[in-house]
Amino acid sequence: MNTLIIYDSLYGNTELLARAIGEAVTGDLEVARVGDINLSGLGSFGLVIVGSPTQGGRPTQAMQEYLNRLPSLGGAKVAAFDTRLTNRWVRVFGFAADKIAASLAARDGTLVAEAEGFFVKRKRGPLAKGELERAKAWTRGILETLES
Ligand SMILES: Cc1cc2nc3c(=O)[nH]c(=O)nc-3n(C[C@H](O)[C@H](O)[C@H](O)COP(=O)(O)O)c2cc1C
């Protein structure tokens, strides 16, 4: 299977996760920052995983603009993740992954996993302990679902 991982990242934590997720993927892999990837052709990938930092309860502006301009995904299999703070108060704003998942579904993407959030200890990071491994496990779960 060929997999595309699209991410945005201000301080590098979401990029680290995107690359860890890529390590858990089998088959052909492309990992691209949101500004470096075309809008078309996503439907040719067997799996498209999209991740962004949560900023103000949403994906980054670049990611939102990308998602807003995305053409139909033609049923392509998709999954979404974000990075987020552990503080309880941030929950009130919501999280990026849910909004990415909703955008992908609205463009005829087929969600193959629950939107997932991974924690940073502080705004600039680092990632909380074990999150890279948890991201790999999340990815392996997706692949198992697709194979069954
Ligand atoms: C402008 C701004 C707004 C943020 N808003 C939220 C938020 O609403 N909820 C949250 O959990 N984290 C929030 N954060 C923390 C980010 O989630 C954190 O910086 C990000 O996960 C780090 O990922 P990155 O290194 O890939 O940029 C915010 C960070 C910035 C810079």
Image: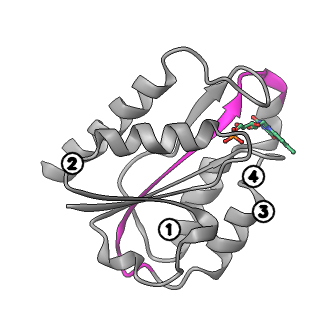
Mark 4: amino acid: Arg
Query: Could you say whether the residue bearing mark 1 is in a helix, strand or loop?
Result: helix
Circle 2/circle 3 CB separation < 8 Å: no
Q: Identify the mark at residue 58; answer none if there is no mark.
A: 4
Task: Tell me the residue at 71%/20% (across/down).
Answer: 121
Q: Is residue 81 magenta?
A: yes
Q: In the shown orientation, is residue 56 left or right of residue 102?
A: right
Q: Quadrant of residue 139?
A: top left
Compare marks 1 and 2 and give the one earlier in the sequence: 2
Task: Tell me the residue at 52%/79% (across/down).
Answer: 38
Task: Tell me the residue at 19%/61% (across/down).
Answer: 1
> Mark 4 packing: few (<14 Cα in 10 Å), some, or many (20+)?
many
Task: Tell me the residue at 71%/54% (across/down).
Answer: 59
Q: Identify the mark at residue 96; answer none if there is no mark.
A: none
Q: Which residues are magenta?
A: 73-89
Disc 1 target residue: 105
Q: CA distance from mark 2 to mark 4?
A: 30 Å
Up-down relation of residue 42 to residue 31 (above or below): below
Q: Identify the mark at residue 26; answer none if there is no mark.
A: 2
Q: CA distance from mark 1 to mark 4?
A: 16 Å
Q: CA distance from mark 1 to mark 2?
A: 24 Å
Q: Nearer the viewer, mark 3 or mark 1?
A: 3
Query: Could you say whether the residue bearing mark 2 is in a helix, strand or loop?
Result: loop
Compare marks 3 and 1 and give the one earlier in the sequence: 3
